[in-house]
Amino acid sequence: MMRSRKRKLQLPNPSPVKSEIVENKDNVASESMNGPYSTHTRPTSEECRAVRDDLLALHGFPPEFAKYLSKRRKVNHNSSTDAVGSPSSFPPSPLLPSVKSEPREDGEDETESLLDGLVSTILSQNTTDANSTRAFASLKRAFPTWEDVHAAESKCIENAIKCGGLAGRKASCIKNLLTTLLEKNGKICLEYLRDMSVDEIKAELCRFKGIGSKTVACVLMFHLQQDDFPVDTHVFRITKAMGWVPVQADRGKAYLHLNKRIPNELKFDLNCLFVTHGKICQMCGKKVANQQRASCGQPCPLSKYYCSTDLK
Ligand SMILES: [Zn+2]
């Protein structure tokens, strides 16, 4: 079952490429103090809660994110960072699922390491959840340990993850990550991040080539159970159409702004709901806003919040 590929790394680091993997690293830490749009006073906390509750009423809590919800409840290390059900200014919605044990799923179980989480996030860029899950499982089958991955030639890593798309770039990113960790810390492990603050984690991870603010935000939210608000294509489109971010905002600035404005205790719920809604709703999922009905046959609850008929 174990395939040994202990060849030495021969390929040099590739030259920088234009790619969404090579994310914008600008100002993740420096602008986090005030945000890029300090005079843009939306969304308000009340808007965030209203939208969260409207989307919950439509979809319920998205089952694809239930395992992360379960993890957050288990961790519950700090009431101020517990997104759902925390004793915060907003009580938990009765529409949220009750606390219960969630079944373990492939690739996301109790033994998942932070490095597993980061690599699975890298593999999820620019592809579907199903493809990235397959790519991660394929990588683990081919190379059972991260040391095995590090010892492998980039081409072999690329072959193992090709079903996830952009395999060459992702393989380079993973290889560089593992090499840097080994050179810097003497071992291939990311668990030391658990002792760091959110800002320290952001600064640390953004040093790795090919790892940008969105990937870091996903790791914080899904794998470290911290309160952060990654801005993917769905989140960006929907929040801009609602006027939560200025029309001129790019995704990087939207991320900084939304993280300043959205209450911590609502970030996880809202993010999961926006992503799911963006995938399901015909109105919000496409660049047309004149459609009145979501795919489920009910009017889209977000239409009343939209300030423009041109979804970006
Ligand atoms: Zn919608």
Image: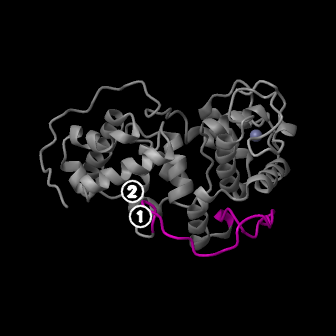
State the separation of the CA atoms marked 1 and 2. Answer: 6 Å
Q: Which amino acid does label 1 sit on?
A: Glu
Which residue is pictured at 73% across the width and 32% down the height?
Answer: 240
**Mark 1 closeness class: few <14, some 14–19, many ≥20 residues within 10 Å:** few
Q: Mark 1 points at which residue?
A: 112
Q: Is mark 1 on a helix, strand or loop?
A: loop
Q: In this view, does 262 lie above or below 234?
A: below
Q: What stretch is highlighted in magenta?
A: 80-109
Find out whether residue 243 is within the magenta segment: no
Q: Nearer the viewer, residue 125 or 229?
A: 125
Label 1 with label 2: CB-CB less than 8 Å: yes
Which residue is pictured at 23% across the width and 49% down the height?
Answer: 150
Main SS category, magenta section: loop
Q: Name the image quarter holding the N terminus.
A: bottom left
On the image, the x and y values in percent for residue 122 come to: 42, 44
Q: What residue type is labelled 2?
A: Asp
On the image, the x and y values in percent for residue 192 come to: 40, 61
Within 8 Å: ligand 1 and the Cβ of disc 2?
no
How is the protein colored in the picture?
A: one colour
Q: Name the image quarter holding the C terminus.
A: top right
Could you tell me if residue 259 is visible in this image? no
Q: Name the residue under label 2.
A: 116
**Mark 2 closeness class: few <14, some 14–19, many ≥20 residues within 10 Å:** some
Looking at the image, which residue sits at the far bottom? 100
Left or right side of 225 for 272: right
Which residue is pictured at 77% across the width and 24% down the height?
Answer: 310
Q: What element carries label 2?
A: helix
On the image, the x and y values in percent for residue 250 come to: 63, 28
